[in-house]
Amino acid sequence: MFLRILVFALVQALAGLLGWFWLGWPGALLGTVIGASATLALDSWRGLRLLRWLREPGLSSPPVLRGLWGEAGYRVMRLLRAERRRADDSAQRLEDFLSAIQASPNGVILLDPEGRIEWCNDIAGQHFGIDPRRDLLQHIGNLVREPAFTAYYAGGNFEREVKLIGRADAPGHPVKLSVQLYPYGDDHKLLLSRDVTALAQADAMRRDFVANVSHEIRTPLTVLAGFVETMQTLPLSEAERASYLSLMAAQSERMQTLVNDLLMLSRLEGSPLPSASDTIDLPALMAQCEVEARGLSNLLHPADERPQRLVFGPPPRFTLAGAGSELRSAFSNIINNAVRYTPGGGTIEVACERLPDGRARLSVSDSGPGISPEHLPRLGERFYRVDRSRSRESGGTGLGLAITKHVLQRHGGELQVSSQPGKGSCFALLLPAHRVRSLNAPAGARP
Ligand code: ADP
């Protein structure tokens, strides 16, 4: 500022001096006036340039100006740059925030005080069939028309959630949503939607399971209680007592088998995955299964009936890495099923082979009644039976294939079933190549 006054005074003095030399005192006065006017004009021109620049819409770099105006331009530019940086940071933060909500597994919709959509993520779009761009500013009530939601929205009590059917719901593909509104800010609302289909299904499965277990246990228990009561109240002959006791033993054995299968299932669900370094003795396991199957076959088809023909292939030249007790249970389940469901005179063939892609395949083919195609997808569901009476008669629990499937899943394998009603069935266990070991290779080495 001091410099500015000094320059102004110097210009006046110089112009006055020049005027005095030229025209004397009137010239000095004239020179001072001209000097002052020129300084003022230059100053105004600089100020105007700065003003014109400030009026520019984009505000590029400021004009090059000297002195006070130059500094003013420079400082305005610095302020503007800081402001732009702050605005960019805020925009970036908002962008990051919206991306985070976009990545959320839940649906999020922001509603204005009138209930119109201000923003919505893609998941919410899928849940309610909303287009996150096209449907902006549409009233939520026009897009989510389920009566349960309309009543919930109109009720104004948002402390609880409401259960709705998702837009993608279709026969055989249920979609259940849990939706809740959270008021925030100035009468705005946040709508959160969660896909609870799996939870609802798990809940229904749990209820079915408890009902099935209770039913399976109640039947033999009722029979047992009836016999106990009979034995307590009626005078029975020794032969009758013996017959009742053997029937009671059969019922308690049925309950025991059921409880053992249930415990096996719960162990499979709760225990860590089988290690890939422990190898089992597959040939010994197959031999054990063969003894068990022949014993069961003789029991179910005594000598006076037509016997079954059990054909076991040559012992495998490979073994498997995994949990021995689990694999034994899976193998014996499908072998014993074939024995139990194939009538006398039928043939059961068991084979162990290694497929060209390195996987192991243990297959059991029978000439039994076969299974209609509509039942095949449901085999392996807990307590799902095709032939209820045959299953119960032969001591089945309805859990054998569920256990088998679970064991295979834990070993990275799969169950393949092919069947033709009236002709027979083939159940095959496929185990992945990384669990197969050549028997001539050192234990634990990969084939
Ligand atoms: P279960 O203890 O009743 O045998 P599983 O889970 O082992 O239970 O089998 C489920 C159902 O699949 C059986 O009830 C039976 O109806 C059918 N099934 C299984 N194996 C065979 C087979 N080899 N031949 C015909 N039906 C079979």
Image: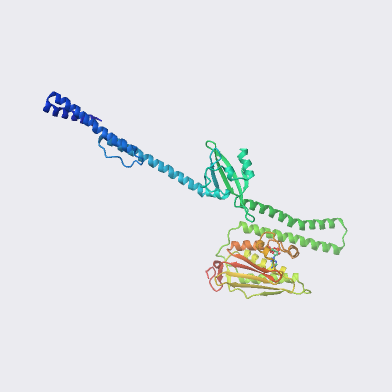
Q: Position of residue 199 (x, y in %)?
A: 62, 51
- Asked which quadrant contains residue 147, the reply is top right
Q: Position of residue 225 (x, y in %)?
A: 80, 56
Q: Image point 25% across, 37% down: which residue? A: 66
Q: Position of residue 365 (x, y in %)?
A: 66, 71
- Asked which quadrant contains residue 35, the reply is top left
Q: Is residue 159 visible?
A: no
Query: As displayed, is residue 126 above or below residue 114?
Result: below
Query: As displayed, is residue 259 above or below residue 365?
Result: above
| Nearer to the camera, 317 or 130 | 130
The scheme the figure's colours follow is rainbow
Q: Position of residue 253 (x, y in %)?
A: 74, 61
Q: Quadrant of the N terminus?
A: top left
| Nearer to the camera, 254 or 343 | 343
Q: Is residue 433 visible?
A: yes
- Asked which quadrant contains residue 254, the reply is bottom right
| Nearer to the camera, 446 or 141 | 141
Query: As displayed, is residue 339 above or below residue 17?
Result: below
Report the number of numbered marks: 0
Figure quarter occupied by ligand 1: bottom right
Q: Image point 26% across, 32% down: which residue? A: 44
| Nearer to the camera, 164 or 118 | 118
Tell whether 251 sits left or right of 410.
Answer: right
Tell whether 271 sits left or right of 77.
Answer: right
